[in-house]
Image (cartoon, rainbow, N blue to C red):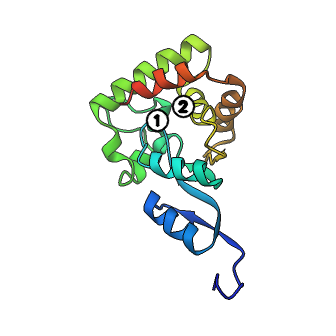
Amino acid sequence: LAQAGKIVAFGLSQVDAAEVEAALAAARVECVQNSLSLLDRASKDVVAVCARTGVAFTAFSPLAGGVLTGKYRAGEPPPPGSRLATRPGPYGALATERTLAGVDALARKAAERGVDAAALSLAWLLADERVTSVVVGPRQPAHLDAARRAVELGLARAEREELGALFA
């Protein structure tokens, strides 16, 4: 279709770097949307390809199904109605003791800045100049507060690296 002129540009989702490169060889790619968060950095190579080629990158699942909000505790069942309680498949493997200890450290860093872990997690993504946009999926209107605070935070590169190291 691209060769026939019927497609001017397209977007991709849930792809790896090789798939982005292959798509770029076939037609113009405008945007890639992949999961990206402090806990899920599998798309780091995709982000690099997008930055190098001028393709927009949109991060989805920036709070890793709510794991980065601090609502899950080691040794405790997930809160009723939470994503880990209702559909643990995509995120259940993230809720390890080690990860939750990292989330506790993230919450302490967030408190030092006067925000919550969700806002600091979103700010980590927004501080990456290669990330064009971040898709947030609030389940309640109050959940938008973290996104608003994240926009105002502005992290320096060293702060961003320090937060990333919590989940290396």
**As rendered, which of 76 and 74 lies closer to the eye?**
74
Amino acid type shown at disc 1: Leu
- Tell me if I can see residue 81 in this picture: no
Q: Relative to residue 116, is residue 143 depicted above or below?
A: below
**As rendered, which of 80 and 47 lies closer to the eye?**
47
- Residue 105: x, y in percent? 42, 19
Q: Relative to residue 117, is residue 20 depicted above or below?
A: below
Left or right for 65, reference 77: right
- Residue 111: x, y in percent? 55, 14
Instruction: Report which residue position mark 1 lands on.
Output: 38
* Pointer 2 or 1: first along the chain: 1
Left or right for 42, reference 27: left
Residue at left offset 57%, top offset 67%? 24
Instruction: Report which residue position mark 2 lands on.
Output: 121
Which part of the image, by quadrant, shows the C terminus? top left
- Residue 75: x, y in percent? 27, 30
Residue at left offset 29%, top offset 29%? 98
Which part of the image, by quadrant, shows the N terminus? bottom right
> Marks 2 and 1, Cα distance to the nearest angstrom?
7 Å
Disc 2: CA contacts within 10 A as few (<14), some (14-19) or many (>=20): many
- Tell me if I can see residue 164 in this picture: yes
